[in-house]
Amino acid sequence: MKRTNYLLFAAVPVLVTAAAYFLVPAGSSEAPGGTDRAAASQQAREDAKAKAERAAAAERAADDKVIASLPPGLAAPAKRELAHRILSTSAASTLNWRGSYGSIEDHGDGLGYTAGIAGFCTGTHDLLALVERYTADHPDNGLARYLPALREVDGTDSHEGLDPGFTAAWKAEAKVPAFRRAQERERDRVYFDPAVRLAKLDGLGTLGQFVYYDAMVFHGPDTGPDGFYGMRERALSKAGTPAMGGDERAYLDAFLDIRRTAMRAKKATADTSRIDTAQRRWLNAGNLGLSTPLEWAMYGETYKVP
């Protein structure tokens, strides 16, 4: 477009004064009315931003009203605990999710160190965000000195500046009650709460809310094709949510299909137990409420919750 504009000026004879007018930057005080136009443009941007913020606030308030009218679902204390226990069997092969506060390991998956109760990663920003928030409240914690290194390696699988002391520092800090609470808050803020909220707005029951939660943790809250929001968009192209008048089982089936394909695309030998012998099993059984007793298999091991 800029090239076309320059050609237009070259082709049309104009007075020198007129050409000078058009060649002065629009916001320049040397252009007639330039200052006024710049101020008006800035005011228009601020008005548009304020309007968008008001619309977003109104939409969120309306959503809050809808959610308040619904059953608690996965947000109920007992179901929330169940969700964390199921997730822990896929992340740590144990029902005891509280035993994972101090876990930290590089799995060789390109995400750097994976640590804590939600698998926070040094390569995917969530671990950095956790330590930054924790340090803001507890400046003298044992992880604070690693913040410069965490910022440098964010988005990579590098350990530069973290080895050899970071893993020991993480395990030591994980014994501190305040850091345990910080992990729980960050898990809920980034993964659990957004997943359950959107699932409810989509009209999904407790099982569907867990399906969203597990996918949010595993794939991240990303808009790319294989991120949580990207997969949801792809599922919507195949089946409607209950909120759209669609069938819940058909929609969840489509979502799980897309998710399974995404896991295998990332790694052909990926173990998809969390879908095949857990979530899909419950869906096929019609357990949309994720009611107990519950039984599932993860990586060949069977788990039961009475």
Image (cartoon, helix red, strand yellow):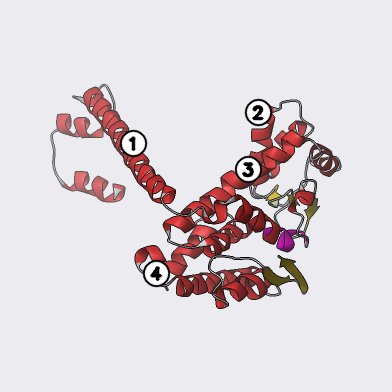
Q: Please tell me whether mark 2 or mark 1 is closer to you in this view.
A: 2
Q: Which residue is mark 3?
A: 186
Crowd tier of the residue under label 3, counting other residues whose Cα lies within 10 Å: few below 14, some 14–19, many 20 or above: many
Any part of residue 273 in sight: yes
Q: Nearer the viewer, residue 290 or 92?
A: 290
The residues colored magenta run 87-92
**Kind of residue at badge 3:** Glu
Secondary structure predominantly adopted by residues drawn in magenta = helix
Residue at 74% across, 48% down: 116
Amino acid residing under circle 4 = Gly
The alpha-carbon separation of the residues under discs 3 and 2 comes to: 14 Å
Residue named by callout 2: 136
Provide the secondary structure element on which disc 4 rests. Answer: loop
Mark 4 and mark 2 residues within 8 Å of each other at the beta carbon: no
Spatial distance from mark 2 to mark 1, Cα to Cα? 29 Å
Q: Earlier in the sequence, mark 2 or mark 1?
A: 1
Q: Is residue 151 visible?
A: no
Residue neighbourhood size for the residue with mark 1, other residues' Cα within 10 Å, grouped as few (<14), some (14–19), many (≥20): few
Residue picked out by circle 4: 240
Query: Would you say 269 lies left or right of 15 here?
Result: right
Q: Residue at x 66, y 43 (%)?
A: 184
Image location (x, y in percent) of residue 115: 75, 49
**Mark 2 and mark 1 residues within 8 Å of each other at the beta carbon:** no
Horizontally, is 102 left or right of 243 in the view? Answer: right
* Three-letter code, disc 1: Lys
Q: Nearer the viewer, mark 3 or mark 1?
A: 3
Q: Which residue is mark 1?
A: 49
